[in-house]
Amino acid sequence: MMQEVTRLMVLLVLGSTRTQQSPILLQENFDLEKFMGGWFEVAVASTCPHYMQRKRENPLIVALKLHHVPFWSNFTMTTNTLRNSSCIETSVHYFLTNTSGRFFHHVTRFGADIDSFVLHTDEDDGSAVMLQLSTEKPSGNKTRIIKLYSRTADVSPAVLHQFQALAMNYGMSEDAIIINQNKGVCLPGEQMAHD
């Protein structure tokens, strides 16, 4: 069954806002409810060697779902990821801020605070661009990650080209860009063969 027009979201994880060279311009008239729903992580790039090693070992499309309960000050991103031939479901809670299109979450495992910004949405082609700024504490380690999300598991060459150009614009090298492989969507608890 055909899904709605392909939508993409590019997710960037960059150093702290204090080191950002250009101003962050948020999407005007951002609509949180239109941003919610199902997505697929179809490509990634990063300056973090550990993250890139993990992604190179398992470059599979990740299914995720964004869910917001109206009048609550957060939303949840639930992902299904293949690890050791098993499908694992994880959730991250993003807190809304006073700025429309800006969110915050904390990753306890790395002691990282992450600010997220929706930079661009396009209802005609169903796309969105999201920027995340993170800093690990207490080390102060700053890395950049950019992720391409789409409403469908397959994206056009033009969308991939735009993602690659944007990734390089944010300091990623062309060889740091990984296009995830579509091996089907895993369901939590399901065992999957891994090539």
Image (cartoon, rainbow, N blue to C red):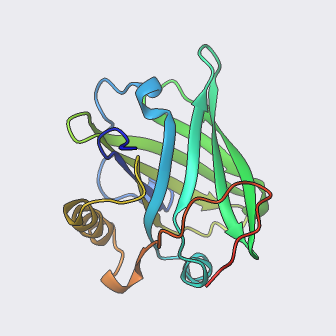
Is 68 placed above or below 112 here?
Answer: above
Q: Nearer the viewer, residue 26 or 141?
A: 26
Relative side of 104 to 98, left or right: right
Residue depicted at x 42% and y 57%: 153
Q: Is residue 159 above or below residue 114?
A: below
Quadrant placement of the N terminus? top left
Q: Residue at x 53, y 76 (%)?
A: 59
Specify whether 174 is left or right of 113: left
Residue 80 location, quadrant: bottom right
- Image vertical order of residue 113 relative to residue 83, above or below: above
Judged left or right of residue 168, residue 20 is right
x 54%, y 46%: residue: 115
x and y, in percent, of residue 4 in the image: 34, 38
Q: From the viewer's side, name the closer residue of 167 and 125.
A: 125
Q: Nearer the viewer, residue 184 or 163?
A: 184
Residue 178's x, y, as percent? 43, 77
- Marker count (numbered): 0
Q: Based on the displayed image, in which of its 4 quarters is residue 160 positioned?
A: bottom left
